[in-house]
Image (cartoon, grey):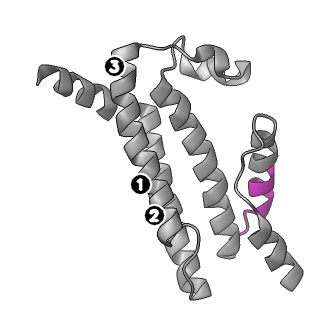
Amino acid sequence: MQTLRKIYIAAAHSRIIQLVIIAVVIDTAFGILRAIKDRNFNSCFGINGAIRKIGMIISIMFLIVVDYVTNFNLIGFIPETIRIYLGNSVGITEFFGMLYIAYEIVSILKNMTLCGLPVKKIWAYIKNFLGKYTDELPDDNELTNESEDK
């Protein structure tokens, strides 16, 4: 029981886990606003979005336990420019948490753009920045289709 308490306390104070949860909530909120605007469910507020978000939260909870048991340090997989903010140790939880945050930021900005907010340039900048490190970014066909419609 004491071990579970230690794991819970460590997880509750992790900035990365807090940021993942905040990003999921914000993305869901903008997904709801976009669904209201379009009068249609979308990838953030439909069943696929719910499954993706629940999967993120469940995997983070599972990875907390894995980190506690294994004590892996994945700092070598983090780009040098980001390491200065993270310290000397990054567990599996934080590693995947950063990926989830990056994915959610792109999704939040996409939803904000599709809601009509003037953030398309910020969205493009973030997408290009993340494109340096991964090619696994969310599809932006909806933005392309919307700009063609106007």
State the mark number for residue 54: 1
**Label drawn at residue 50:** 2
Looking at the image, is mark 1 or mark 3 earlier in the sequence? 1
Q: What amino acid is labelled 3 in the image?
A: Tyr
* Image location (x, y in percent) of residue 89: 51, 14
Classify mark 2: residues with Cα within 10 Å, few (<14), some (14-19) or many (20+).
Answer: some
Q: Is residue 39 left or right of residue 9?
A: right
Q: Secondary structure at mark 2?
A: helix
Is any atom of residue 150 visible in this view? no
Inspect the magenta stretch and tell me whether residue 124 lies in it. yes
Mark 3 lies on residue: 68
The residues bearing labels 1 and 3 have C-alpha atoms spaced at a distance of: 22 Å
Crowd tier of the residue under label 3, counting other residues whose Cα lies within 10 Å: few below 14, some 14–19, many 20 or above: some
**Which secondary structure, mark 1?**
helix
- Find numbered disc 3 in the image and state the secondary structure of the residue it sits on: helix
Location of residue 40 in the rendering, given as x and y in whole percent from the top left corner: 57, 85
For the residues bearing labels 1 and 2, Cβ distance under 8 angstroms = yes
Question: Front-most of 106 and 49?
Answer: 49
Task: Provide the residue span drawn in magenta.
Answer: 117-125
Which three-letter amino acid code belongs to the residue tagged 2?
A: Ala
Q: Image check: 31 left or right of 141?
A: left
Question: Do the residues under discs 2 and 3 have CB atoms within 8 angstroms?
Answer: no
Crowd band around label 1 with a 10 angstrom C-alpha radius: few (<14), some (14–19), many (20+): few
Residue with the most extreme right position: 148
Rounded to the nearest angstrom, the CA distance separating label 1 from label 2 is 6 Å
Image location of residue 82, percent across then percent down:
66, 24
Residue 66 position in % (x across, y down): 38, 24
At x 83%, y 71%, the residue is 144
Horizontally, is 51 left or right of 149 in the view?
Answer: left
Q: Quadrant of residue 1?
A: top left
